[in-house]
Amino acid sequence: MAHKSVVWTHMNKISSTKATCKLCLKELSITGGQTSGLKRHLETQHTVNLSKDDEKQPKLLMGHRPVSATRADKIDKMIGKFIAENMLPMSTVESAAFRELIGYLEPQYKVPCRQTITGILQQMQNELKTKVETDLATNKLAQIALTTDIWTSLTNEAYLSVTASYVTDDWKLKTPVLATFPMEERHTADYIAQCLKVTTDDWGITQRISTVVHDGAANIKEVGHINNWGDVYCAAHKLHLIVSSSLGVDKVNNNPISRCIGAASRLVGHFNHSCLATSELMKRQQSMDASKPSRKLIQHVKTRWNSVFDMMERLTELRWPVLAVLSDRTVTKLAEAKTLDMKEEHWTLIEELLPVLRPLQVVTSLFSAEQSPSASTVYPTLWKLIKREFAPADSDSSTIAEFKVGLLLFPGSPRVQYFHGREGVGAILVQ
């Protein structure tokens, strides 16, 4: 016989004395065949409206139960984690759209103000610092290497970041960031060394520091020595300087490769600044091969030599869609097309350069790895580059041959005097 009460829409009857709630799977008792206890459970625990007027269409009114202090605290911390991991501004909690979203998900929850979320983030930082300090103390025999660099924000403020690298007792590599703070004085070697010393003293690891890894700038190349630590120059940064100089992207240069990069950069810049050209490029790619996703061109930046490789590789892949857009007079004016269209010799040079640059791209990625030790790979990797990848070949054009020689015989310009008279990729091996 079918159950007449609307309660049974949300309940499963197990026996004459027991039933199970479909919403929370809780087992409930039935006293004397009455469903009042079941109805009370649905109304108080799940806010199900079971009034007689609504018995034909029961409604589930979610989110109107009070939020417990434990749940509110958990949501506070999750919002703090959301802001921290996505590097969002603390004003996110003041956003009307954000508050509307939280209000829909949890109507009785009060979104914390900016001051409260600041305190939550500070508490999270303290908890994380305690966790790292505990890990450092647990692995007290591990020697620690620091990695440091000075960088500039979009608001032209200088910051120093310090990362520690060590291997735990169970052979796991850890790389926590110990500090990032503003540089408020002149960036002298003594001041940088002092900042590093303050950081290691704060963490209680000064006596465990073995080396400091950094670039070869004049004001930082001996900061480790000042604190009685070792100094290790970053192989990836040295490789960047060598390749950038050989490509001619580090300064004004009139060699064929530099002119080719300049032409490619102008072409990519046109598409990056023209919505019409970019939109048409997407359409041309689909019309030529609808099975592949449309992609944009990549612009190179001087601080990353491998962006030149990425730019050239993408240009080669999209050569024909790009030329189709340049030849369309409804999109590109004739005068612009003549200026932007790369010469055939440039396309040929790019095709010759890519196989030479690809091993350097792989090595740069290898040296830049964070979660795997790269120091042991420097010598064998660079030795292979010198002996095999950069070895002269009869098929090399004069430009490629000159480029290979430039990689091996890097000129000792004032900017890179830290090579101490050594030259090219071989200098990294000697160091």
Image (spheres, helix red, strand yellow):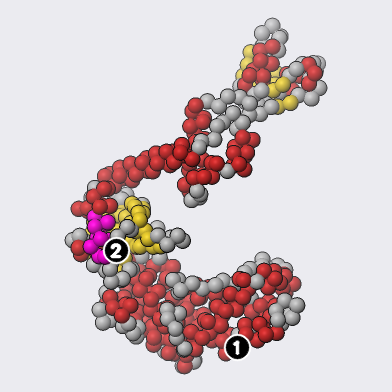
**Above-or-below relation of 263 to 39:** below
Quarter holding residue 430: bottom left
Indicate yes or no whether the magenta region holds residue 203.
Answer: no
Instruction: Indicate left or right for 310 with 280 as reference.
Output: left
Q: Residue at x 27, y 61 (%)?
A: 192
Instruction: Indicate left or right for 31 with 164 as reference.
Output: right
Tell me the kind of residue under disc 1. Answer: Lys
Q: Which mark is residue 343?
A: 1
In percent of width and height, residue 169 lies at: 29, 49
Residue at mark 2: 186
In-front residue for pair 86/213: 86
Q: Residue at x 36, y 76 (%)?
A: 382
**Above-or-below relation of 90 to 66:** below
Crowding at mark 1 (Cα within 10 Å: few <14, some 14-19, many 20+): few
Is residue 376 visible to us here?
Answer: no
Identify the secondary structure beneath mark 2. loop
Q: Residue at x 32, y 82 (%)?
A: 413
Quarter holding residue 315: bottom right
Q: Residue at x 44, y 90 (%)?
A: 401
Instruction: Indicate left or right for 264 with 186 as reference.
Output: right
Quarter holding residue 22: top right
Indicate yes or no whether the magenta region holds residue 190.
Answer: yes
